[in-house]
Image (cartoon, rainbow, N blue to C red):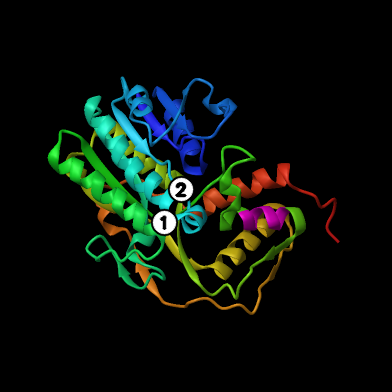
Amino acid sequence: MILVTGGLGFIGGRVIADLVSCGFKVKVATSRKNSRLPNELVSCELVTLDLSCMENLLSICEGVSVIIHLAGTNANSCAADPVNALMVNGLGTLNLLNAAKTCSVKQFIYFSTIHVYGTPLSGEINEKKLPKPVSSYAITNRLAEDYTLAFGSSSELDVTVLRLSNAVGLPLTDHSDGWKLVVNDFCKQAISSRVIVINSSGVQKRNFVAMQSLIEIVFGLVESGLGAMRSGVFDVGGDTVSILEMAKIISERCTKLFGYTIAIKTSSIREDLASFEFHAKRIKEFNFREHPLIDEIDKILVYCNTNFNNTLSDK
């Protein structure tokens, strides 16, 4: 049995859908009230998650062999309430690790963030670089990393920390927070209004990884065990492009797929232009299959064209 916390989130939903399609039994843990499983996950067990309550955590960890920990407070919520961020991301992860140890869980995969390296990112980014978290989001994720690695060193629990850049993929539902992410938002804008509006100059760079590449990594960890990845920290990323370049890629795909002409509008607001290199070379040594970003972008665009196309005809 696999327990996925934050299982109704953007990444969690996609990961679980693939796990289920391959025959894994999954518990979907969420703190969202009155939640329902989407159709793709109806075979899963839905459980309530309370990272502050050991009784709850011990209950949901019972009979579980693998935990994929995705639940946490996002960047905006962390900034608004740093104390709650500490309680959820930091101490909540510690509580879950203690429950996992008590229930003899074998494997724990923690999803962290590339932002533990600092803000803005600069220079060459790899696992040897000293983390310098600045925001509450990054600081509390770094704390959760340390707790996770400590348990890997002092117990029978096999642990892996994945420092993720920006996952690109089609959300499982229309109500997913994933639609707020830059690539999904741009795709939705392109289809619904034939315009992509960038609220900056667009020259700032981001690293993006295809969701299916991320899922391949999770499957590799779950199916074949950790081996050399026991108690390891691994960067997970893909292509580094500017926001403007990403908008142009989406525009070009719209033209190729649908014949749409997409305008791109930028503002005069400029962001920090510090350059960085993020290649995630270490995890690639394990030969996980990499998937192109364009494949994910095309899936998002096709879905948007079916569900969010408000334009009756091109002029």
187 falls in the magenta region: yes
Where does the magenta region start and end? 185-191
Nearer the N terminus, badge 2 or badge 1? 2
Q: Is residue 139 left or right of residue 14?
A: left
**Which element carries disc 1, helix, strand or loop?**
helix
Question: Which residue: 52% across, 43% down?
Answer: 10
Question: Which residue: 15% across, 33% down?
Answer: 156
Question: Which residue: 48% across, 59% down?
Answer: 79
Specify few, some or many for label 2: CA neighbours under 10 Å numbering under 14, 14-19, or 20 or more. Answer: many
Residue 102's tag is none
Most frequent secondary structure within the magenta stretch = helix
Residue picked out by circle 2 = 73
- The amino acid type, in three-letter code, at marker 1 is Tyr
Is 268 located above or below residue 62 in the figure? below
Along the viewing direction, whichever of 46 and 198 lies nearer the viewer: 46
Q: Position of residue 152 (x, y in %)?
A: 18, 41
- The amino acid type, in three-letter code, at marker 2 is Thr
Residue picked out by circle 1 = 137
Assess whether mark 1 and mark 2 are in contact (beta carbons under 8 angstroms): yes
Q: Position of residue 268 (x, y in %)?
A: 64, 79
The quadrant of the picture occupied by the N terminus is: top left
**Residue 214, visible in the rendered structure:** yes
Q: Is residue 192 left or right of residue 171?
A: right
> Which residue is at the far front?
83
Q: Position of residue 135 (x, y in %)?
A: 41, 63
Label 2 to label 1: alpha-carbon separation: 8 Å
**Which element carries disc 2, helix, strand or loop?**
loop
Is 128 located above or below residue 31 in the figure? below
Is 6 located above or below residue 136 in the figure? above
